[in-house]
Image (cartoon, rainbow, N blue to C red):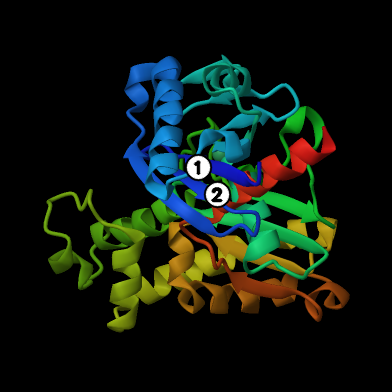
C-alpha cells in the first residue's frame, strides 16, 4: 500500500499520475476534460484513468493507499465536496465520495491551486522554507499559503482569492462580476489583453505580424514574451506594467502573511524575469524593509506537474491523519 495517485483537473485537460512513496512518477496520463459532459461522466473518466496509469506502470490497485484530486473553484476538503466550480459548471458535487465508491480507494480532494502550491512547497521551489506563498498566473490569478507544512484555508475554505482584490487605476470587467480586479491585468489573459489594446490604440508591434487573425483573438502571453525578447516596445511596456501592478497586489499578501518565499506558477510564470524584474522593483517600494530583505521570489519548478505531485502528497498526508 505504498503508492499514491494524484489528479489535476483543469478546464481543458485532466492529468493523472501514479507516484511512489518518494513522490516520483511511475506513470502519467493526460486526457481532455470534456467538461460539457458533466460531473458523472468526468468521475467515470477519473476511474478509467486510474486503471490506465496502473496498467502503464504494471502495478496493482491494491498497492494504492490513497487518491488526491486537485479541482478548480471552491472546494470543501473536509466533506470532499466541490462546492462551486464556474468553469466546470459544478455545484455541490460530492466528488470524493462518488469517486471512492467507484474505485474502493480513499479519495481526498482540494482546490487545484492549493494542491499546486502544496506540491511546490514539498518538492519544488518552496522546499525548505517555513512559509510558502504561491500564486498561479493563468486564465486568472489565484493564491495559496503553506505555513510549516499546513495549508491555510480561511472561513468556508475560501482563502486565496488574491486575484479579486481591486487595483487602483484598473477598470476592466472581471469574470467575478466586479471591475478592475488584479487578475484582469496580472494573468496570462491580462498580458494578452493589454498588448491587444495597445495595438488597437494604434501602437506598432511585431505582434501584429505574428498574430494573423483580424482581432488578434489567438494572441498569447507567450507571444508577448517572445516579442519582449525581440525588443518590441509594446511587449516591454506590457510586461513592465503587469509586473508593477502584480507587485501592488502581492504587497498586501507579504505584509499580512510574512512569507519566506513567493512561488510563481501558471503559464504566464514562464515569462520569468521579464515579469519578475519590474515586479521586484515595485514590491520593494511597497513593503516594510524587514519583510523585503528576507523575501525570496522564485519561479515555480513544477509548472506542469505541481498539481499532481501536490494532490498525491496531500492524499498521503490526509490518510495518515485520518
Ligand atoms: Zn474579480
Q: For this rendering, which residue is in front, 278 or 294?
A: 294
Q: Residue furthest right?
A: 290
Q: Is residue 132 left or right of residue 112?
A: right
Residue 201 image position (x, y, % from top left): 27, 59
Task: Tell me, yes or no, if residue 272 can be seen here.
Answer: yes
The reply to whether discs 2 and 1 touch (Cβ–Cβ < 8 Å) is yes
Q: Position of residue 19 (x, y in %)?
A: 55, 51
| Residue at (38, 38) in percent of width and height | 52
| Residue designated by label 2 | 307
Label 2 crowd bin: few (<14), some (14–19), many (20+), radius 10 Å: many
In the rendered image, the vertical position of residue 90 relative to residue 139, given as above or below: above
Task: Provide residue 42's location: percent of width, then percent of height.
Answer: 41, 24
Q: Is mark 2 within 8 Å of ligand 1?
A: no
**What residue appears at the point 74 percent right and 32 percent down from the top-left corner?**
157
Q: Is residue 101 above or below residue 154?
A: above
Q: Is residue 14 visible?
A: no
Q: Eyeballing the image, is 183 above or below 210?
A: above
Instruction: Judge by depth and name the residue closer to the eye, 64 or 227.
Output: 64
Residue drawn at (55%, 55%) of the image: 306
Secondary structure found at label 2 = helix
Q: Quadrant of ligand 1?
A: top right
The quarter of the picture where the N terminus appears is top right
Q: Position of residue 245 (x, y in %)?
A: 57, 62
Sequence-wise, which precedes: disc 2 or disc 1? 1
Image quadrant in which the C terminus is located: top right
Picture quarter containing residue 246? Answer: bottom right
CA separation in Å, label 2 and label 1: 5 Å
Which residue sits at x=76%, y=70%?
Answer: 128
Residue picked out by circle 1: 8
Q: Is residue 221 shown left or right of residue 46?
A: left
- Circle 1 sits in a helix, a strand or a loop, which is it? strand
Q: Is residue 231 above or below residue 27?
A: below
Amino acid at each position: 500500500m505504498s503508492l499514491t495517485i494524484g489528479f489535476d483537473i483543469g478546464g481543458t485537460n485532466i492529468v493523472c499520475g501514479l507516484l511512489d512513496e518518494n513522490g516520483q512518477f511511475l506513470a502519467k496520463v493526460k486526457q481532455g476534460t470534456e467538461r460539457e459532459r458533466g460531473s458523472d461522466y468526468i468521475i467515470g473518466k477519473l476511474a478509467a484513468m486510474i486503471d490506465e496509469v496502473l496498467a502503464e506502470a504494471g502495478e496493482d490497485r491494491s498497492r494504492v493507499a490513497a487518491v488526491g484530486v486537485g479541482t478548480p473553484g471552491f472546494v470543501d476538503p473536509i466533506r470532499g465536496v466541490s462546492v462551486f466550480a464556474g468553469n466546470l459548471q459544478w455545484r455541490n458535487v460530492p466528488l470524493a465520495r462518488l469517486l471512492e465508491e467507484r474505485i474502493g480507494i480513499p479519495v481526498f480532494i482540494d482546490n487545484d491551486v492549493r494542491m499546486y502550491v502544496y506540491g511546490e512547497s514539498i518538492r519544488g521551489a518552496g522546499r525548505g522554507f517555513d512559509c510558502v506563498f504561491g500564486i498561479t498566473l493563468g486564465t486568472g490569478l489565484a493564491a495559496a499559503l503553506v505555513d510549516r507544512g499546513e495549508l491555510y484555508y480561511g472561513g468556508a475554505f475560501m482563502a486565496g482569492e488574491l486575484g479579486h482584490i481591486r487595483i487602483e487605476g484598473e477598470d476592466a470587467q472581471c469574470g467575478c462580476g466586479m471591475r478592475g480586479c488584479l487578475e484582469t491585468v496580472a494573468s496570462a489573459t491580462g498580458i494578452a489583453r493589454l498588448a491587444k489594446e495597445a495595438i488597437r490604440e494604434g501602437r506598432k508591434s511585431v505582434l501584429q505580424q505574428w498574430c494573423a487573425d483580424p482581432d488578434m483573438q489567438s494572441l498569447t502571453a507567450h507571444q508577448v514574451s517572445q516579442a519582449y525578447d525581440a525588443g518590441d516596445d509594446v511587449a516591454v511596456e506590457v510586461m513592465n506594467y503587469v509586473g508593477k501592478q502584480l507587485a501592488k497586489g502581492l504587497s498586501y499578501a507579504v505584509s499580512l502573511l510574512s512569507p519566506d518565499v513567493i512561488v510563481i506558477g501558471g503559464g504566464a510564470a514562464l515569462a520569468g524575469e521579464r515579469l519578475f524584474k519590474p515586479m521586484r522593483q515595485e514590491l520593494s517600494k511597497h513593503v516594510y524593509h524587514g519583510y523585503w530583505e528576507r523575501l525570496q521570489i522564485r519561479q515555480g519548478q513544477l509548472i506542469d506537474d505541481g498539481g499532481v505531485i501536490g494532490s498525491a502528497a496531500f492524499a498521503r498526508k490526509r490518510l495518515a491523519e485520518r
